Amino acid sequence: MSTAPTPPADGTATELKKKEPSAVAKAIKGDPDDRSGAGWFVKGMLLIICGLWLVPTVGLLVSSFRTQAAVNTSGWWTAFVNPTEFTFANYGEVLQQSVGGSTLAEAFINSIVVAVPATIIPITAAAFAAYAFSWMEFKGRETLFIVFVVLLVVPLQVAFIPIVNLYSFLGIQGTFLGLWLAHAGFGMPLAVYLLRNYIGSLPREVIESARVDGASHFTTFVRLILPLSVPALAAFAIFQFLWTWNDYLVALILLDTARLGQVSTTYLAGMIGTFGAREHLLSAGAFITILVPLAVFFSLQRFFVRGLTAGSARGLGDGLTPRRGAPGEPGAATTCILSRTPAVGGRAIVRCRPA
């Protein structure tokens, strides 16, 4: 049965100290010791940036409730002058309309069918690769990692022609499988880079103690690395899901929409019409498709922030950082190992013993 950390017989103990908040964090929280006014400046800049980001979304929302004549003749900001022109008919028409033989509900289902596997595949492969790059020694490790990093700056458009030729040869052009593999390949460089940096910063003492106890690489990865890396995994999952859900170009080229149906982005592109005279329907349909990414982001928001900013031991819970004392200090010559998989956001239970 797992117990809380127990001090060794000689009276030494592993120290846990809370990290001091950064200057930016103090400014954002309005630290009372801040006399320079930096906190108000940071808050003001954040409000301005948030306002600029929200303006297009507000315009989209307002346009989705306006009539076709109003949208075609005036800007969305004029709608507040005459609020009587608002209507809910656009949403009803969007839900009943068919584009390219697909309804909005069918396009939603296809988008989920594309986005979920295209998110799971690169996360799974990149997690194994990140562990290998961080904690396994093999020839050419650093060179191979540099290759992954370089791929981050390569435009994905240059790969379309070779991919189409390869898929045609393999017989998977126009299928969901081909689209999954393409999205997985395009997301792998970022996934490996992000997860490798996070996994590589986990406490070495925990990994080495697992090896001393006879754990294999696979056991260490499954029972230690994965639970501690949930924030980084969730952060990349948000990036990848949003990318695949909002993608238009890859789906347009690699998916046979005539046979398998539309995804949400190609559905919206076909909805606007030849001369772009149906922007009121496009706004309503676009706002409906925004709901799924918003739900995914807000449900994983706490992991997103931790995954991008957490330090080496944030995965142990509550921002506590284990520190081995110098010779003669408490905690000196002590080895610690995670004795139970911690719940996300909970306090990890670490078993410590003299080295």
Image (cartoon, grey):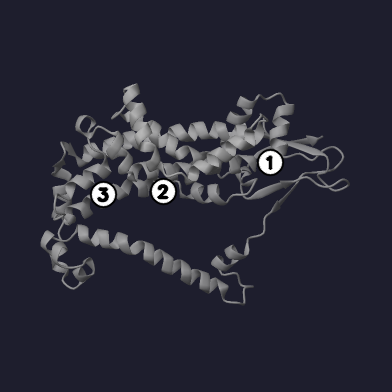
Q: Amino acid at mark 2?
A: Phe
Q: CA distance from mark 1 to mark 3?
A: 44 Å
Q: At which x and y percent is residue 38? A: 57, 73
Q: CA distance from mark 1 to mark 2?
A: 29 Å
Which comes before the other along the chain, label 1 or label 3?
A: 1
Q: Quadrant of the C terminus?
A: top right
* Left or right, residue 100 beside residue 332: left
Height in image: 69 above or below 181? Answer: below
Q: At which x and y percent is residue 51? A: 38, 66
Which residue position holds label 2?
297
* Left or right, residue 243 beside residue 123: left
Which comes before the other along the chain, label 3 or label 2?
A: 3
Which comes before the other along the chain, label 1 or label 2?
A: 1
* Residue 344 visible in the shown view: no
Tag 2, which secondary structure?
helix
- Locate residue 8: give its quadrant: top right
- Locate residue 118: give its quadrant: top left
Which of 302 and 267 lies nearest the eye of the viewer? 267
Tell me if mark 3 has few (under 14), some (14-19) or many (20+) residues whose alpha carbon lies within 10 angstroms of its own: some
Which residue position holds label 3?
288
Height in image: 271 above or below 160? Answer: below
Q: Residue furthest left?
A: 69
Tag 3, which secondary structure?
helix
Q: Amino acid at mark 3?
A: Ile
Is mark 1 in CB contact (under 8 Å) with mark 2?
Answer: no
Is mark 1 in CB contact (under 8 Å) with mark 3?
Answer: no
Which residue position holds label 1?
203
Q: CA distance from mark 3 to mark 2?
A: 15 Å
Q: At which x and y percent is residue 235? A: 49, 45
Q: Amino acid at mark 1?
A: Pro
